[in-house]
Amino acid sequence: MRRDGNPEFIEALARGLDVLRCFRPGAGAMTLSEIAAATGLARPTARRILITLEQLGYVRSGERGFSLTPRVLELGMAYVGSTNMWELARPHLRDLVEQTGESCSIAQLDGSDIVYVARVAVPKLVTLAVTIGTRFPALQTSLGKVLLAALPREQLDKALAEPSRSGITPRWAPERDEIDAVLRDVRAKGWAVTDQGLALGIRSVAAPVRDGDGNVVAAVNVNAHAAETTVETLVEHHLPLLLRTASAISADWAAWHARPLETVAGPAGSRSRPDESRA
């Protein structure tokens, strides 16, 4: 059945995406039965989808079942490339890493999770590995607090109602009253800090990245190991540097999206289309 009653909805495509998303971090290979159970699909349907994905190069089959291939990364990197976030943020993140000696990242909100879209890391032993595309529960991260605090009430309620797809059980599990108090504090200060709420040993401070209209489009953070960096160091030393970096990235983001686009005339009788080059 169509999920929202829209006659334009393609159920087969949605089922294929469900199969790709059912592979959890660290799960490795999954059997046909596990995939069918995870997606709620009948085994024959799941099998046909997996065969299709295998022929397209997104899935491989082996003795222990099915697993994703690196080609799946193309789907996520297409998003990162289309926003130009990495190219805009890279020099600023590198400067921030040099100034703080800590790893720095940018993330955006997806449901109740954050997803990392840019990162410059320093080699340190941390509890949880982070790469582009890594997903964490938003509420327990400084990045997520900034992003959630920027949502209107209705969107916030919807986001918090969604279960995390990160596969991680965070240490901090607050009630709604505490959540609202924390997010009010983030709105008032304009930044957020978290101290081992996601996992032991991880603390960070984050600030919003805004577009030309002042809307929060992402968040940037400085991430540190709790055994090496105190909360006081994060707030007193790293935060001012972070706020300047967030402002610089926001300015570049606004300038990029405000750039003029050249209109290219098409063949006679056809519509003109915008060209992606600058005028």
Image (tube, rainbow, N blue to C red):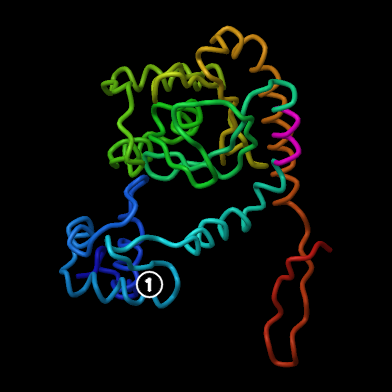
Residue 165 in the figure: left or right of residue 34: right
**Residue found at x 76% / y 38%:** 91
Q: Would you place residue 227 above or below residue 172 in this image? A: above
Which residue lies under the disc numbered 1?
A: 53
**Residue found at x 47% / y 43%:** 134
Residue 91 lies in the magenta stretch: yes
Residue 124 in the figure: left or right of residue 196: right
At label 1, counting other C-alpha atoms closer than 10 Å, the crowd grade (few under 14, some 14-19, many 20 or more) is: some
Q: Would you place residue 271 above or below residue 62 in this image? A: below
**Residue found at x 63% / y 56%:** 81
Report x, y in % for residue 242. 66, 24
Residue at the far right: name it: 279
Report x, y in % for residue 102. 63, 24
Report x, y in % for residue 27. 32, 48
Observer-nearest of 51 and 180? 51
Observer-nearest of 5 and 147? 147
The quadrant the N terminus occupies is bottom left
- Boundaries of the magenta span: 90-96
Q: Secondary structure at mark 1?
A: helix
Q: Amino acid at mark 1?
A: Leu
Q: Main secondary structure of the magenta part?
A: helix
The quadrant the C terminus occupies is bottom right
